[in-house]
Each structure stands twice: as C-alpha cells, then as structure tokens.
Amino acid sequence: MTNITRDEFETVKELLGSAARYAESAHRGLDRLEMMQQHSQEQIDQLIGAQRQAEQRLDRLEMTQQRSQLQIDQLTVKMDQLAEAQNLTNQRVSTQIEELAKAEKRTDQRLESFIFESQRLITKHSESIEQLKGMTERLDGVLAYLIRKEGRDE
C-alpha cells in the first residue's frame, strides 16, 4: 500500500512547496506584523510621553491659574478697599464743601451787614458833616459879625 506513484509524489512535492511558500509568506507577514507592532508600541510610548508632558503642562497651567485667581481675588479685595476709601473720602469732601458753603454764606451775610452798617455810618457822618458845615458857616458869619462889631466899637 505504500506504493506512491510519481504523479502522487509530484503532487505531494508541489503541495509541500506550496505549503513552504505559504509558510514563508506567513513568516514574512508575521515579521511585518511584528515590525508594525514594534512601530505601534514606539508610537504608543511616544504618545504616553507626550501625554505625560501634557499632564505636566496642565498641572503647571492649573498652578498658574490658581496663582492668577489668588492674585485676582487679592486685587478684588484691594479694589473694594480702595472703593470704600474713595467713598469715605468723597463723603468727607462733601461734608467739608457743605461746611465751607455755610461758612461762605455766613461770611457773605456778615459782609453785607458790615457794608450796610458802613454805608449807614457814612451817610450819618455825611449828614453830620453837612450839619457841621452849616454850623461852621453860621459860626463864620457870627464871628465875622462879631469882628465887624468889635471893629466898629473901637
């Protein structure tokens, strides 16, 4: 039963050759797959490295953002304090302006009173001066009369 004919031998030889070619092709395919897997692993490693760097950058960015938020909060507090101080200053200035306006009004009233009294006194003195001029003229007349009368009596 083990008589193999030449045709069968050729067929087996062709099958073995075909199987060997298939095996070599599969081996080359495995080599390519292995190279692709290595390449993929390298890319994954690079991506992992890039991801770590991105995470580190994100951590630094988060810290920077926290510092910035803290500074913004501090500036907000300072601005609120400055606004409150400005309000107090404005209130003080307004109060001082009101006081100055009242003082100015009192000064104006006193000045008007002084001017009125000065004008009244000037008018009174003018009247007195006019009266004195009249008296002086009469006394000049009386003196002239007395001088003439004395000049006649002598």
Image (tube, rainbow, N blue to C red):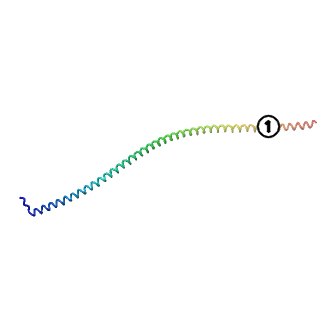
Asked where in the image residue 19 lies, by quadrant, the reply is: bottom left
Give the labeled residue for mark 1: 132
- Residue at horizontal 41 percent and vertical 45 percent from the top: 63
Judge whether 2 appears above or below 138 on screen: below
Asked where in the image residue 12 lies, by quadrant, the reply is: bottom left
Q: Is residue 25 left or right of residue 117?
A: left
Asked where in the image residue 140 lies, by quadrant, the reply is: top right
Query: Which part of the image, by quadrant, shows the C terminus?
Result: top right
Furthest residue toward right: 154
Q: Position of residue 105 (x, y in %)?
A: 62, 38
Q: How many marks?
A: 1
Q: Position of residue 70 (x, y in %)?
A: 44, 42
Furthest residue toward left: 1
Judge whether 111 appears above or below 52 on screen: above
Furthest residue toward front: 2
Query: Which part of the image, by quadrant, shows the N terminus?
Result: bottom left
Nearer to me, 48 or 80: 48
Report the amino acid beneath label 1: Leu
Judge whether 143 appears above or below 62 on screen: above
- Residue at horizontal 35 percent and vertical 48 percent from the top: 52
